[in-house]
Amino acid sequence: MKVDVIKIGNSKGIRLSKTLLDKYNIKDTVDLILEKSQIIIRPLAKPRKGWEQSFKEMSNNGDDRLLFDDVFEDENLDEWK
């Protein structure tokens, strides 16, 4: 696909059509990857999307307990001061 490079203030950029933005689920931020003389634009994934609801469900089900203690019996916390 051919697109024109346009002036944006003191910089230059490209315009992406609404069709492309919708098709690739591009919102406000993208991941820009420079690789082998290419520029790759990827939608920025939200890896924690849905976690809040999942945590609420876990809490409601009583399944939000620690799997192991956060401080071990033989741990020396003085060395971290």
Image (spheres, grey):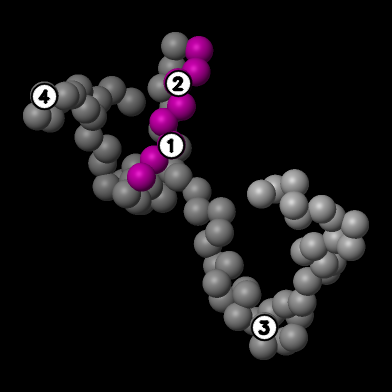
| Residue 9 on the magenta segment | no
Q: Which disc, if any, is residue 10?
A: 4
Mark 1 surroundings: few (<14), some (14-19) or many (≥20) residues within 10 A: few
Span highlighted in magenta in the image: 29-36
x%, y% of residue 30? Answer: 39, 40
x%, y% of residue 50? Answer: 55, 67
Marks 3 and 2, Cα distance to the nearest angstrom?
42 Å
Marks 1 and 2, Cα distance to the nearest angstrom?
10 Å
* Dot 3 or dot 4, earlier in sequence: 4
Q: Is residue 36 visible?
A: yes
- For the residue marked with disc 1, what is the amino acid? Asp
Marks 1 and 4, Cα distance to the nearest angstrom?
22 Å
| Residue, disc 1 | 31
Marks 1 and 3, Cα distance to the nearest angstrom?
34 Å
| Residue, disc 2 | 34
Please report contact status of discs 1 and 4: CB closer than 8 Å, yes or no. no
| Residue, disc 3 | 59
Marks 3 and 4, Cα distance to the nearest angstrom?
51 Å
* Dot 1 or dot 3, earlier in sequence: 1
Which is closer to the viewer, label 3 or label 2? 3
x%, y% of residue 45? Answer: 50, 48
Marks 4 and 2, Cα distance to the nearest angstrom?
22 Å
Please report contact status of discs 3 and 4: CB closer than 8 Å, yes or no. no
* Dot 1 or dot 4, earlier in sequence: 4
The N terminus lies in which quarter of the figure?
top left
- Is 65 on the left or on the right of 53, as rendered? right
Secondary structure, mark 2, is strand
Secondary structure, mark 1, is strand
Residue 41: which quarter of the image? top left
> What type of secondary structure mainly makes up the magenta span?
strand
